[in-house]
Amino acid sequence: MTVVERREIALVDLLDRLLAGGVVIAGDITLRIADVDLVRIDLNALISSVNENVPSPWGDLP
Amino acid sequence: MTGLRYVYAVCRPFDAPLQAQLTGVGGAPVKMLAHHGLVAVVSSVPEGDFAEAPLREHLEDLDWLGATARAHQQVVDALTAVTTPLPLRLATVFRDDSGVRVMIESGEEAFRRTLDRLDGRVEWGVKVYIEGGEEPAEAAPAAKPVSGRDYLRQRRNRAQEREDRWRAAERFATRLHGTLAAHAEDSRLHAPQNSALTRGSGHNVLNAAYLVPRAHSEEFVELVDHTKDEEPGMRVELTGPWAAYSFVDPEGRGAGEAAGTGGTGDTSGEAE
């Protein structure tokens, strides 16, 4: 498939699919990332703490 | 092979060779585990990273998460080149090969159904941004207000401009989604990405995924291309082709359900 030149995929696009998409199966050791929101909020905290100029991103959508 | 088994995808057996030297998470070689006429694509990962407690910790480490996600995607991508994989959620891990076999057996029927439904299809991601969507409210005031009334009027005007822009963006995004959905077999609306994560490239108003037969992908991409300059102040971004991550559930639960493409189904997954 060469219709579009693949550029570096943004991490956020990747996580949209890998953390919110894909088949969810409980593995043997209860590894099951269904708590997408939790993961995302942790991510947010992380990013905000790195960059204080970033306003709190949650809840500012229309 | 020691360590835990990380499963990337389930697919039907395929003949085409995978790219040589394909490695997965942590650089481990990728292998095929055939069982009951299906193939699980797996690699070995260290228990020290993927047991529940360390994994939970790792997920908050953006570097680790990024590297793992890219490794996962690299494997799924390689599979997409030769077959139609059913991608699993990031970090699906089993104790050993027999755990993987049990998983295949218990999900067998759902896997086959979904593989049939997705066969020969790929996913395209389309996002619409309002360019420079961040600044208007706090932009430097044009002129210093001379009175309280003046100030309020300026404020009102700015709020009005902002609202107009949002309306226009919404109209554009709705129209675009309608057009693209009509040219796709299925679609999902993901939650818009928040601007902190997208690194200030405008405000994301549409974040959609479209399921398109591989054979029609070129037309779909052209269609998206044509819309790009249609609306000033809007940016349209295309990503893909992806394995059909967003379409593993027929009804589109999770990210898609809030957004109204009709994904109102129950939340029972494919593979319990």
Image (tube, coloured by chain):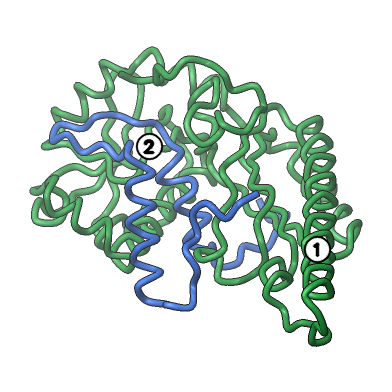
Chain colours: A blue, B green
Task: Identify the residue at the far right of this view.
Answer: B230
Which disc, if any, is residue B268?
A: none
* Residue at the disc numbered 1: B156
The amino acid beneath tag 2 is Leu
Where residue B55 appears, as percent x and y from the top left, is 19, 52
Question: Quick check: do tags 1 and 2 share a chain?
Answer: yes
Does residue B139 sit above or below B242 in this rendering? below
Instruction: Output the chain of dot 1.
Output: B
Instruction: Output the chain of dot 2.
Output: B
B225 vs B85, left or right, is right
Answer few, some or many: residues within 10 Å of disc 2's Cα (few below 14, many 20 plus, some between 14 and 19).
Answer: many
Does residue B234 sit above or below B218 in this rendering? below
Cβ–Cβ under 8 Å for marks 1 and 2: no
Residue at figure coordinates x 53%, y 16% from the top left: B265
Q: Earlier in the sequence, mark 1 or mark 2?
A: 2
Is label 2 in a helix, a strand or a loop? loop
The CA span between labels 1 and 2 is 49 Å
